[in-house]
Amino acid sequence: MKQIKVAAAVICDNMDKKQKIFATQRGYGKFQGQWEFPGGKIEKEETPVQALIREIKEELDTEIRVGDLVELIEYDYPDFHLTMYCFWAAVVSGNLILKEHKAARWFTKETIDSVKWLPADVELIQKIKQRM
């Protein structure tokens, strides 16, 4: 089975209190309309943190500070196995401009379950809620 490694940013409003988190809605592909945490594929020469910084700059025109690992998700989609490194992150500069996604929102612990998440992100949502 094909293996894909990605890094995802759980961008929060405050790294200490974590009252709101930022997520994006896919505007393309099989999972169009579902919600995910921004990020992308890790290139061969990159660490997960380096990939995440690059991907957020490319996708959202924003510089982030990467914090602790929230969770390492291993998930089997029908066509591939996903390894997803999920990190807390905070905006350093930029305005989270959508370049690839359909929509974006800030979620609270109370609103995070109000949208349909990508299958691999469902387990992550529970971990995030425990830490908010």
Image: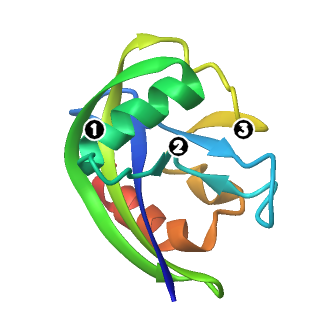
Q: Position of residue 132 (x, y in %)?
A: 34, 48
Q: Label 1: how many residues lie within 10 Å, few (<14), some (14-19) or many (20+)?
A: some
Picture disc at residue 50: 1
**Circle 2 residue:** 38
In which image quadrant can residue 124 be found?
bottom left
Whether label 1 touches label 2, CB < 8 Å: no
Question: Which element is circle 2 on?
Answer: loop
Identify the amino acid type marked 1.
Gln
Q: Earlier in the sequence, mark 3 or mark 2?
A: 2
Q: Residue at (38%, 52%) from the top-left corner? A: 42
Identify the amino acid type marked 2.
Pro
Identify the amino acid type marked 3.
His
Picture disc at residue 80: none
Whether label 3 touches label 2, CB < 8 Å: yes
Q: Earlier in the sequence, mark 1 or mark 2?
A: 2
In which image quadrant can residue 100 be found?
top right
In this orientation, which residue lies closer to the viewer: 125 or 69?
69
Q: Label 2: how many residues lie within 10 Å, few (<14), some (14-19) or many (20+)?
A: many
Q: Earlier in the sequence, mark 1 or mark 3?
A: 1
Q: Position of residue 97 (x, y in %)?
A: 63, 19
Q: Residue at (32%, 35%) from the top-left corner? A: 89
Question: Which element is circle 3 on?
Answer: loop
Please say whether residue 92 is visible from this viewpoint.
yes
**Circle 3 residue:** 101
Question: Which element is circle 1 on?
Answer: helix
The relative height of residue 15 versus residue 6 in the rendered view (above or below) is above
The relative height of residue 113 versus residue 104 in the rendered view (above or below) is below
* Picture mark count: 3
